[in-house]
Image (cartoon, coloured by chain):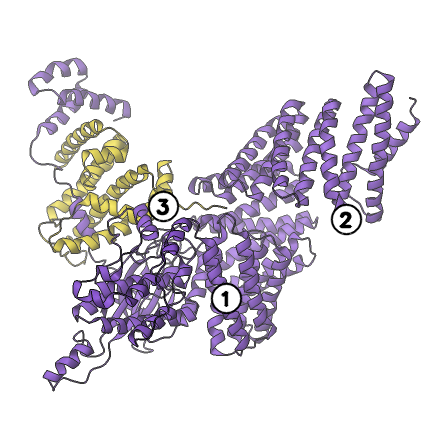
Amino acid sequence: MPTPEAPEVTQLLHQWQEGDEHALDRLVPLVYEELRAQAHRHVRRERDGHTLTPTALVHEAFLNLAGESPVPWENRVHFFAVASRVMRRVLIWYARRRNAAKRGGGLAALTLDDDLALSDTRAEDLLSLDDALARLERLDTRLCRVVECRYFGGLSVAETATALGISPATVKRDWQTARAWLRRELSDDA
Amino acid sequence: MDATRWTLVRSIFEQAADRPRDEREALLAEACADDVALRREVDSLLSAHDDETPFLDDALATAAWRLLDEPEAEQVGLRIGPYKLLREVGRGGMGLVYLAERDDGQFEQRVAVKLVRQGHLRHDLVRRFHHERRVLATLQHEGIARLLDGGVTNPLPGAPDGLPYLVMEYVEGEPITTYCDRHDLGIRERLELFREVCAAVRYAHQNLVVHRDLKPSNILVEDQGGGATHHPARRNREAQDRPEASPTRRPRVKLLDFGIAKLLDAPDADPVLTARTGLRALTPTYAAPEQIRHQPVTPAADVYALGVLLFELLASTRPYDVTDLSPSEVERVVCETEPPRVSDSAPPKRQRTLRGDLDTIVAKALRKEPERRYALAADLDEDIRRYLAQLPIRARPDTATYRASRFVRRHAVGVGATVLLVLTLLGGLLATARQARIADERTREVRQLAGTLLFEVHDAIRDLPGATRARETLISNALAYLDGLWQDRPNDPDLQHELADAYAQIAQIQGHPYTTNLGDLDGAERSYRRALDLRLALWAEDSTDDDLRHDLAVTYRDLSAVIGWAGSEEALPMQRRAMALLAPLLARDAPDVRHDAARLRSEYGWSTIFDSRYEQGLADVEAAIAVLERLAAQRPDDLQLHIDLWRAYSYRADGLSFSGRHEQVLELMETRGLPLLDRLLRRYPNHSRLLYGLHIGHNYVGSSLQGTGRPREALDSREASLRYAEAMLAVDTTDQKSQEAVGRSLNGLAQSYAAEGEVDEAARLYRRAIALAQARYDEDPTNIEAGNRLSLAYRFLCRALADAERYADALAACMPSIEIQEQVAEDLTTGVFVGNLGSAYGHTARIHRAMAERVGTVGARQHHTAEALRYYALSLDVLEAVEAAKAGQDANWEVHPESLRVEQAALRRAPD
């Protein structure tokens, strides 16, 4: 009997597309690990003068995860969307940790270079942004996805359009609306 | 704000935002009218929109990427078993590697701990993991970093299972390629170093362990003393200039991660689930074509990787550059492109030395077909030795004809060749084993056959079309080998353990009813009994070994499943014995044990139900269900556990329906059984065992509805049952179980339609069942079971038509039934098939009698009466013979001979 040879990640992507939210929970650690491995490889290279392009890395992460089997294009672009959500979680996690450290949570200060660091203010901004995004998600899920792809995932308008299965024009409009909404929310908070 | 309101806000905002500010007012005034709140909402968004200070402009992704690379400080300082993690020393596709030290005061030791980060080993694989880890731990060679320990960590909070980890000798060194280049070694020095690699791989191959992932980062050169300084050859040269230099020691090659790739990529016990996990971290540059294509892996795969390495060492470049290629391009390059000659790729000053023998050696190691490569690392090593000693090498260059034929055969290469290679290897081992004394060191190497190579090959070919013959050969060879060992009655307990494991595994392949198997129940029984005997003997020696206790219980359970399937009365006592064995282990509260025990209890209950002791059987099954449900809630990712829970539900459904409690069957299936399967199927689409479960489950519902007088409602369930059976068949059109499932559903559905008086629909479905059965019988006309089923399918149709008084059509369906049944009954003496022939005659007789009663003309009536009498006689001839053979036992007649006799007598008395 033939076995479903598709690697775990493509199966999970498929299930997620079908609306199985559990699949996302199982995807995230998988994607997280692979992104970490990619980051490790490339940040080292970057120190030798190579530039880091997030999209290329996400592509590569996906290839690694999807293995040798042929993969439908939709899987790849959905993977982008998952990767963007993972990125959001990563950043928020660090921002939280950083805040905890500042409040005397006992963790050693993070040794990040200044240019890329999550400065203290930025960490706080990120946390408020995350809260606002959570509210936006309840109001309009697609806007939240677009912000994740564009801002956290570093995807271009075209890539975001493919990842979310909407037209580039819609992405542009959504992005504009989401930005206005978030900016207002965040200034209300201030 | 509700969704409608937001949509409105959004739409007004978007229209306004697109316009210049001075043109917005009219639009807003009209759109918002006097809804002040709406206007305020839109205005606030617009003013945020108009704010031109930077906001969300720089994508944070880059920062996120860097954050991702932060060392995960929290792991360090953790303890895993007796080891304390000191720092991270590497990471790869499989997980993280830490430098660690043993700090339980026993002894000081620095080790490398590899923590598998991706994918949890499901608990059913943990035992296999342990087994293979034992095998790997026996590798003791100075060139191989030893596997010291390993296990599964305690589950983290919220995680269903622990993470597997491995503890290895810590090696401080640099990759062999870097080492050679940094020391600027010459060709001879490189070859000598390479031979050390070969020696280590050779040793592993003798132990039937294949590395599978040889690459420079797994082949380190350790400098002995003096740190990473000088290669001795260089140092000697320098030593002449600097006489004070200390005496040198040889650098040592150490291979890491032997067999780990396989250990972590262990195929699932469940064939349908052999989905590759993301953790398969092959390095395509060094992977052999058969690995790229997921074909069986043999030592020749390591030879290939050694070939790539040798190429790299000699030419300082790789034969292929696959770094930026897509998977399909990698496959094309590795599997189809001829590698360049190593001499052509090397720097100019080395080219002359490489041309000739070294070109030939490298080319032979890099051949696409495993069987045309050096079979073992030892053979490659031998040719290098010969080259260095200036002896003629054994490898021959490819001929032009060979190249041409390869082109043709390229796509045909696969299972056959590789299996052949393994069989050859087995043959050789067999001979060696016979010569050697059993307790001999050599046998220790040989016995690993069962644990590793054999099952690796079997698992790899199991699902390939047409692999059955190869599997059978493989199994019979392996059995011959094991039987050879068995006959010598080994008294080495380790060997007995291994033999028992091997027999148990072979038995499962031969015929465990709940897994994909070769259908050889007798063979499976024999092998399980051998495993049982061996384990009982070990148990007699040491009844404190809990693992053995568990193994023994599982052997009893599996053996009872095999013989219970064949209806043996021995099955029940065996299951009781197994439960008694497991009972003391339950105190430890290990989920595995509770799972096994509950599964056992459900099977025991089922056997009891089949023994017609319904209440008792149901009580056991229900107790098992309670445990399994609890476990399943704790382990939502454990598919095997959920499938076992479903099986327990189906046992309960059997018990309930046998004792006539249809309403309870309905409730069980509708509230628990089917929802469980539906949930699982969403996660594992097209999983054949789930589809099969749904097929059976809807069938239960259908028969229960039918049984409680609701045939109309039963139709829906039977349709559903058919749909799932068809889905199974779509996954694999040759699968016998799926074909039978479709047949069963078609017949069930047809019966329901027939009962509803919709004969045409019933006949249509019966005809589909016939076509299916016909196809199977055509496939293999010697398969009498298939013939019997085909004949029965015609009879179903025949009966439905006769019941609807469509006698001519019924007769037309009866004729093939008789014809086929005669063919099958011919070579048979067993009662059931002959009895079926009697039934076919009996039906025909009844149809003729009915026609005789109804047709108008005298001639026709006489004809049908004569035919009826002829068929009554034929039928009773056969059935009375069966009756005599049964000697008064209660037989399950399709057509009872007694009623035929009555009908026959009545017809004889009837006036013409």
Does residue A130 appear anywhere in the picture?
yes
Write down the colour of chain A: yellow
Does residue B583 appear anywhere in the picture?
no
Q: Is residue B414 left or right of residue B694?
A: left
According to the image, label 1 marks what residue? B426
- The picture quadrant where one finds residue A175 is top left
Residue B829: mark:
2
Q: Secondary structure at mark 2?
A: loop
Q: Is residue B797 left or right of residue A35?
A: right
Tell me where residue A157 appears, x and y as whole percent.
19, 33
According to the image, label 3 marks what residue? A69
Write down the colour of chain B: purple
A150, B580: nearer the viewer:
A150
- The picture quadrant where one finds residue B769 is top right
- The picture quadrant where one finds residue A109 is bottom left
The single residue placed furthest to the bottom in the displayed view is B243
Mark 3 Cα shell of 10 Å, populated few (<14), some (14-19), many (≥20): some
Tell me where residue B727 appears, x and y as whole percent.
51, 37
Tell me where residue B44 appears, x and y as whole percent.
13, 26
